[in-house]
């Protein structure tokens, strides 16, 4: 499985426009299926997650695998996954 390290985009990932830009970079750099690695990331905003997590999950049969998440990120991703009806797998 291919890994995309999100800390290359900063420690706090927020904003819809920023999420759109990050999504485009990730899709160009990392082949599907992929795992999103949050090591070094402290927080994520729901708008950012909508633009990155939900879109990538949509290309992976509504499934996304994440690792190295803290409780703040886990809470946000759980909310986004529930709303978007995607399968969130935490490694």
Image: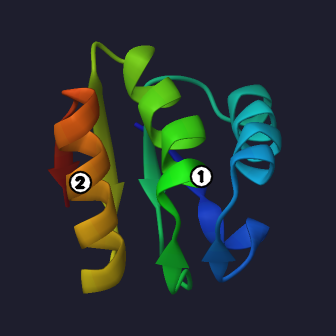
Q: Position of residue 32 (x, y in %)?
A: 51, 23
Q: What mark, if any, has residue 14 been given in the picture?
A: none
**Is there any visible trace of residue 32 in the rendered image?**
yes
Q: Which badge, 1 or 2, is on the more N-terminal residue?
A: 1
| Of the pair 9 and 34, the residue shown nearer to us | 9
Q: Which mark is residue 48?
A: 1
Q: Nearer the viewer, residue 91 or 84?
A: 84
Instruction: Determine the image quadrant of residue 5.
Output: bottom right
For mark 1, does the 10 Å Cα neighbourhood hold few (<14), some (14 to 19), or many (20 or more) residues? many
Please give the name of the residue rendered at 47% of the width and 62% of the height, measured from the top-left corner.
37
Residue 61 vs 41, above or below: the answer is above
Give the quadrant of residue 11.
bottom right
Any part of residue 70 in sight: no
What quarter of the picture does the C terminus occupy? bottom left
Residue drawn at (74%, 76%) of the image? 10
How many dots with numbers?
2
Query: On the picture, is 10 further left or further right than 50?
Result: right
Q: Residue at x 28, y 13 (%)?
A: 61
Residue 28 position by quadrant: top right
What kind of element bears circle 1?
Answer: helix
Task: Left or right? Give the position of 30 relative to 1.
Answer: right
Q: Position of residue 57 (x, y in %)?
A: 38, 27
List x then y, in percent, for residue 9. Answer: 76, 66
- Quadrant the N terminus occupies: top left
Q: Which residue is mark 2?
A: 79
Above-or-below relation of 52 to 49: above
């Amino acid at each position: 499985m291919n890994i995309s390290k999100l800390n290359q985009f900063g420690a706090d990932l927020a904003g819809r426009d920023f999420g759109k830009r990050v999504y485009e970079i990730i899709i160009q750099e990392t082949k599907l299926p992929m795992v999103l690695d949050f090591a070094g990331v402290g927080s994520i905003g729901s708008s950012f997650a909508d633009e990155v997590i939900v879109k990538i999950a949509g290309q992976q049969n509504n499934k996304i695998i994440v690792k190295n998440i803290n409780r703040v990120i886990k809470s946000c991703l759980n909310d986004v996954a529930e709303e978007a009806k995607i399968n969130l797998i935490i490694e």
